[in-house]
Amino acid sequence: MKTKGDHDKLRSLFSKIYTEEIMQERIEEIQVNPTDEIDKSKENDDGYHATFCSPKYQTASLVGCVISMLQQLTGINFIMFYAANLFATTISSMSPYQIVSLV
């Protein structure tokens, strides 16, 4: 909005979240430096590869991915797949009182 010069729309949006004084200050800041924020965002846009594969975050990314895979392999999928067999064998060998105590 600020690059297209749509100041009325910008003012209506800012009025929802700022008081009149702060809104005017923000609009003046934008009018003084209209391209600074856009240039900064382009400079810092490194992408996913640079974020997850940089040496600073490489170990953390690897550990997070490995933990996620292990959770999928050992988690709820196992229980849901074998639940019918597990309950059938467990409940058939229990007395009604033991079944009620499980619930």
Image: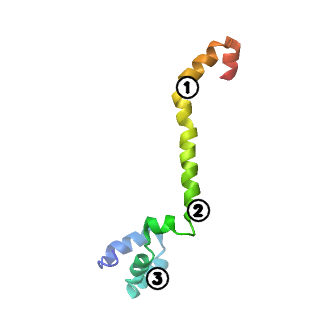
Q: Quadrant of residue 98?
A: top right
Q: Which residue is mark 2?
A: 59
Give the residue type at disc 2. Thr
Give the residue type at disc 3. Glu
The secondary structure type at the circle numbered 2 is helix
Q: Nearer the viewer, residue 26 or 53?
A: 53
Q: Residue at x 62, y 13 (%)?
A: 92
Task: Pick whichever of labels 3 and 2 is earlier in the sequence.
Answer: 3
The secondary structure type at the circle numbered 3 is helix
Task: Pick whichever of labels 3 and 1 is earlier in the sequence.
Answer: 3
Q: Which residue is mark 3?
A: 25
Q: Residue at x 60, y 17 (%)?
A: 89
Q: How many residues crowd mark 1 within 10 Å: few (<14), some (14–19), many (20+)? A: few
Say which of marks 1 and 2 sits in front: 2
Residue 95 is situated, as x and y percent measured from the top left of the image, at 69, 11
Query: Is 79 situated left or right of 9 in this image?
Result: right
Give the residue type at disc 1. Ala
Q: Which residue is mark 1?
A: 83
Q: How is the protein colored in the picture?
A: rainbow
Say which of marks 3 and 2 sits in front: 2
Q: Nearer the viewer, residue 49 or 23?
A: 49
The secondary structure type at the circle numbered 1 is helix
Q: Residue at x 53, y 30 (%)?
A: 80
Q: Residue at x 30, y 79 (%)?
A: 5
The answer to whether residue 78 is seen in the rendering is yes
In the picture shown, does residue 81 fall above or below 57? above
In the picture shown, does residue 1 fall above or below 80? below
Q: How many residues crowd mark 2 within 10 Å: few (<14), some (14–19), many (20+)? A: few
Q: Nearer the viewer, residue 9 or 81?
A: 81
